[in-house]
Amino acid sequence: MIPAPFDYEVAESVEEALGLLGSREDAKLLAGGHSLLPLLRLRVTRPSLLVDVGRIDELRYIRDAGSSIAIGALTRHHDVATSPLLQEHNPLLSYAAGLIGDPQVRHRGTIGGSLAHGDPASDLPAVLLALDGEVDVVGREGTRTIPAAEFFLGVFETAAGPEEMITEARVPKLSGDHGWSYLKFRRRAQDWATVGVAVVAKRRNGSAESAAVSLVNMGPTPLRARAAEEAVVAGDDPGAVAASGSDPPNDTNGSAEYRRYLAGVLVRRAVEEAMR
């Protein structure tokens, strides 16, 4: 389909973008476009104004922030995947970014766009959730820091307000006693995950001192699999309880029952990999 008519403006700064965003009630931000453009073509969304923020270079960076790594919202997936800083201090995020779509998608899509879209089938929201990351959003009243656990509210719904934009995401540095894994099942390399699993485990003397397990496409938001986390620490089978509290969809890629089974398989494998 062809998108509904809209006006188009290019913002050269965060301040200009916020001014344009607040100028109309139904304005939308455009970064890489891989999330928004398909919705425009299907007319799921019909903004009267698109504000292109893709040229705001001040939001394109990966830098050391002490105990964490700060990533500008307009940083491309390719740059996240190939960053030496992330590969050293948070290889989970770097690895997961390298699995997104195909090279064309990774060279255009941005981490901020992926988080703002709030798709429960997307990779990076679940990874950020497992890492207990944070998201900075800025509006006319200043900057707010929102924990990943509070950022994703529903399908395509986040805690960022209609006149706010994401400026930065932060993830902690993982120490040498942390193991990690990211696994996902998909029919084709560029497809969204039918189910995905991100695991971070703090290891001590061959067992898990703590664990974080998050699920992709098992509910209206990325989910922490709390029962599986407790099972990892207790030395029990996390796959048996991986789908507890989830609400997976039924669609052409799989039934809810199939997704629950698949989540168990992937969680078990991901935990084993993280503990190695």
Image (tube, rainbow, N blue to C red):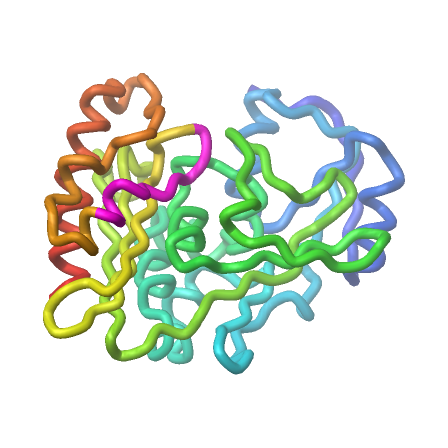
Residue 54 in view in this figure: no
- In the image, is residue 229 part of the stretch drawn in magenta? yes
Residue at the (55%, 21%) spot, across then down: 42
What is the x, y in percent for residue 118? 52, 39
What is the x, y in percent for residue 150? 55, 45
Quadrant (top left, top right, bottom left, bottom right) of the N terminus: top right
Q: Is residue 273 left or right of residue 244?
A: left
Q: How many marks?
A: 0
Residue 252 in view in this figure: yes
What is the x, y in percent for residue 261? 16, 29
Q: Is residue 83 left or right of residue 47?
A: left
Quadrant (top left, top right, bottom left, bottom right) of the C terminus: bottom left
258 above or below 60?
Answer: above
Please provide the residue range marked out in magenta: 220-230
Residue at the (27%, 46%) spot, across then down: 197
- The answer to which image quadrant residue 36 occupies is top right
Residue at the (41%, 74%) spot, across then down: 173
82 above or below 214?
Answer: below
- The answer to which image quadrant residue 117 occupies is top right
- In the image, is residue 201 part of the stretch drawn in magenta? no
What is the x, y in percent for residue 178? 26, 70
Q: Is residue 18 left or right of residue 103?
A: right
Q: Is residue 120 left or right of residue 218?
A: right
Residue at the (51%, 55%) spot, across then down: 111
117 above or below 170?
Answer: above
Q: List the single residue furthest toward the front.
A: 234
